[in-house]
Amino acid sequence: MSVVCPVNLDREKLKSEVRATYARVAENPDGNFHFHRGPEYAARLLGYDLAELKALPQTATAPFAGVGNPFLMDPLPAGATVIDIGSGAGMDCLLAGQRVGLRGTVVGIDMTDAMIARARTGAAEAGLKQVRYEKAEITDLPMERESIDVVISNGVINLAPDKEAVLGELCRVVKPGGRLQFADIIVGTELSEDVRNNIDLWTG
Amino acid sequence: MIEALQQAGFGNARACHFFDSFSGTTKEGVARKYGVRGANFIAYKTA
């Protein structure tokens, strides 16, 4: 039995809308959006350490638009290989890079050119050589099978219409005994077909 | 989500923390109407 909500929307249109929305966030984080952005939000509602965020480049923190905090769960081991799917401007990647240290690796994956560009600038500003970014879709990761210790993500899996494909791809790349620790949105009520097919509500 | 994680091959999947991620946004009313909020999940790939 499928556990994925059946949707009848145009998946390519959804992908295009998501890419366009987050390109706008990358280019103008202080613009008018229907979701919070930035380090103050992350500290006030999600439990991030504001002092730690203020020590990171604004290039990476200002467009942050996550919905939870993957760092409240198990600590990332020093030396671990970590990927962040839908890494955006890279705030969580930089935090992960600090935790895994120089012996570790963090790879941020995003499908938005503007976010990748901004994230690379932020990593260079932070001087974290263990952090890099690759443009890819989260259903087709540029990683070897069973090569990843920990997958983090923050508010991205909900944007994918085929969550089974995303989770299947994550299972392919994670090492046996490795883990996912991610944040995403949950919905407390059964949604009507009209709501499930409303792209504005997916991307908003 | 927990069921989807299990079907994909991850075990001991659970939601750990919850967040009012849309509080104070223009979509706060919609979020309240449908019970939309942020959540942390953890799951382990079966060894």
Image (tube, coloured by chain):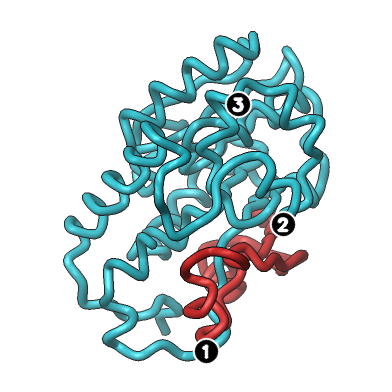
Chain colours: A cyan, B red
Tell me, yes or no, whether dots 3 and 1 are on the same chain.
yes
Task: Give the spatial CA distance, label 2 vs label 1.
Answer: 22 Å
Q: Are marks 2 and 1 on the same chain?
A: yes
The amino acid beneath tag 2 is: Leu
Using the image as rendered, state which of residue A125 and residue A106 is in the foreground. Answer: A125
Front residue of B30 and A142: B30
Chain of the residue displaying label 2: A
Residue position marked by numbered label 3 in the rendering: A106
Q: Is residue A173 above or below residue A15?
A: above
Secondary structure, mark 2, is: helix
Q: Amino acid at mark 3?
A: Val
**Residue, disc 1:** A189
Badge 1 amino acid = Thr
How far apart are labels 3 and 1 at the CA level?
Answer: 36 Å
Element type where label 3 sits in the image: strand
Instruction: Give residue A45's mark.
Output: 2
A153 up-or-down from A196: above or below = above
* Percent coordinates x, y for residue A158 in the rendering: 45, 63
A77, A185: nearer the viewer:
A185
Tell me what residue is drawn at x 21 percent, y 72 percent. Answer: A9
Quadrant housing the N terminus of chain B = bottom right
Chain under callout 3 = A
Which badge, 2 or 3, comes first in the chain's sequence? 2
* Residue at position x 33%, y 38% in the image: A23
A150 is higher (above) or lower (below) than A68 = above
Q: Tell me the residue at 55%/46% (across/down).
A: A37
Q: Earlier in the sequence, mark 2 or mark 1?
A: 2
Q: Nearer the viewer, mark 2 or mark 1?
A: 2
Residue count near mark 3 (Cα–Cα under 10 Å), binned few <14, some 14–19, many ≥20: many
Q: Position of residue A32 (x, y in %)?
A: 40, 50
